Image (spheres, coloured by chain):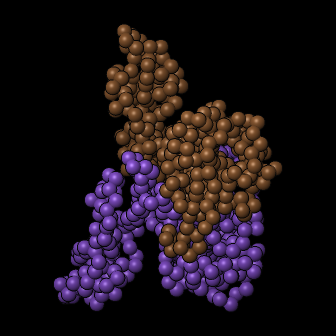
Chain colours: A purple, B brown
Amino acid sequence: MEQIRVGIVGYGNLGRGVKLAIEKNPDMKLSGIISRRPEAVKWEVRGEIPTHFLDFSTEYTQEDFNVVILCGGSRKDIPRQGPYFAKYFNTVDSFDTHKRILWYRKKMEEAANPGAHTSIISAGWDPGIFSLERMLGSAFLPGSKTYTFWGQGVSQGHSDAARRVKGVVDARAYTQPIGKAIDEVRSGFTPELTKRQMHRRLVYVEVEKGADERRIEKEIKTMPDYFDEYETAVYFVGKESMAKDHKRLPHGGFVLTSGKTSETNRQILEYRCALESNPEFTASVLVACARAACRMNKEQMFGAYTLADFPLAFLSPHTGKAFTKKFW
Amino acid sequence: MEQIRVGIVGYGNLGRGVKLAIEKNPDMKLSGIISRRPEAVKWEVRGEIPTHFLDFSTEYTQEDFNVVILCGGSRKDIPRQGPYFAKYFNTVDSFDTHKRILWYRKKMEEAANPGAHTSIISAGWDPGIFSLERMLGSAFLPGSKTYTFWGQGVSQGHSDAARRVKGVVDARAYTQPIGKAIDEVRSGFTPELTKRQMHRRLVYVEVEKGADERRIEKEIKTMPDYFDEYETAVYFVGKESMAKDHKRLPHGGFVLTSGKTSETNRQILEYRCALESNPEFTASVLVACARAACRMNKEQMFGAYTLADFPLAFLSPHTGKAFTKKFW
């Protein structure tokens, strides 16, 4: 069996997760890492994987990789890297700025098509699997209500926001779903829930010596867009606790769809993931999508796709009779 | 907007559910019911829907329906009706004999292709959504273990089996997942579980006057293939309780996938449905698939498909920008 040659673009938490996931998929091979700091990466992977400098003047050749997985951030990296690499390779990414997905999709469509490449965009668990489950719930139960709960888990965006407060050395913000709300929906009620009724936030903060904790707490709790619409608790912890108790990146969540098929019969669908490592799981989804992108490319399915736009069987290493016997 | 004209073949619990589901989807219209007892159906639907006699000599024309939904049983009806109707129309069914799906798929492929029709087979929740979730769990978490739990819910096959015991007037068999096993998997363990450790069965039985309850109980509990591999409890109830407490058809279940992405990080995915009416929910899935089959047919995707073989966006009444904004 010829292995799929995968490239990683960007080697942070997500890129490291992709390396681990490729190692668990015998039909794939990590063929190179493209990074802004290739020397550091080379050292980290003990020279076992070819590393390349990431710039936007290199003319890549298709021989290097069958597919590249974009592991940079959605704010600045992917909007530029996506269209650039889609010119040269099949690509997969987890672009997660929900409001800009339509815009990004169009850019990727335009970039991938001329070179007959396939790009799977906005894959991961949300957007990605959760989007798919919201869609399925709505299609299977017209007139239903869908609820998405996140957590308990680390919100990187909210952690970054808390870190920007003056006097804060480090911060870790957790999103916590409110159990009462989940229980209500699971019991068959379909309440209108405000943001505050669905989630609370817990922020663990390490501050500079002598910093005004009351001011910091107030600034965090009232920060618009991030914390002001939630019940937020702020805890001050030392450097040691921050390093020991808050180094992991768990996450997860629930998509609940509740609807009636007749006067008397309510149907409730629930998709849930409980992740000990958010980046490692997202990486695993991306690697399955890398397999799909290569297969779709062989079937001449060019352009940009989300998880709703291609037959999901492409994700599985199993095919044909074995596939049906195993899952159906 | 031109509505999709849907036909129902077979008007039992599932067919009635399909009628209800079509009424909840404004882009669809129930255009006819084909039944072995069209007069009774006509009376039941108050003459509001054209009813036709089901036989295998009628030469149907494509003008009648854009798609027909096969609502008969998997043992005898669908294996014959599927290939017959796929000659004339796009079709959707919930053929659920897991072991014969490959055989059935081939038959449907051969029947649908010559007339350029599209057939979605084995849709519903299991096989169907659960199959899809088992496949996704396996693709996203290589090396993981997947567990399927069913219930609590009525098993029609086991109810029928209990009814065949001499002296039994009526029976209702419930499948119940064993909470301890679910909790274990949810907590991150990946035990090897026997059938007995995953499910138990409860059978409510109404017997003939003077029947030997001890013999009946023993015959049920030791019945091979059906009850002997499970802890089974048999309860004797009167006619009234049978009609009052056991008339509904709830069901549901869980697909749990548990795997590690690295030494330290376990990831658990769970799909769950809690259904107050099994046939009404299955019907809802079939109706969404009817929409998909018509769209796929327009895109010249002919032949037989399961839920893993086509882009799931085809299931949704939402399209384009509205689709992305709503779900992504």
Question: Does residue B290 show up?
Answer: yes
Q: Position of residue B166 (x, y in %)?
A: 47, 13
Q: Quadrant of the C terminus of chain A?
A: top right
Asked where in the image residue A270 lies, by quadrant, the reply is bottom left
Residue at 53 percent across and 58 percent down: it is B25
Q: Position of residue A31 (x, y in %)?
A: 67, 70
Question: Does residue A15 show up?
Answer: no
Q: Quadrant of the N terminus of chain A?
A: bottom right
The answer to which of B168 and B85 lies nearer the viewer is B85
Q: Position of residue A121 (x, y in %)?
A: 59, 73
Q: Residue furthest front?
A: B47
Q: Going by the image, does A121 lie left or right of B56?
A: left
Q: Going by the image, does A236 lie left or right of B217?
A: left
Q: Residue furthest right?
A: B114
The number of callouts visible is: 0
The answer to which of A266 and A61 lies nearer the viewer is A266
Instruction: Give the answer, above or below, for where B186 lies relative to A73.
Output: above
Q: Position of residue B209 (x, y in %)?
A: 37, 12
Instruction: Give the answer, above or below, for where B29 lies relative to B9.
Output: below
Residue at 44 percent across and 17 percent down: it is B168
Residue at 46 percent across and 37 percent down: it is B193
The answer to which of B101 and A320 lies nearer the viewer is B101
Asked where in the image residue A221 lies, by quadrant, the reply is bottom left
Residue at 27 percent across and 88 percent down: it is A167
Asked where in the image residue A251 lies, by quadrant, the reply is bottom left
Instruction: Give the answer, above or below, for where B195 lies relative to A242.
Output: above
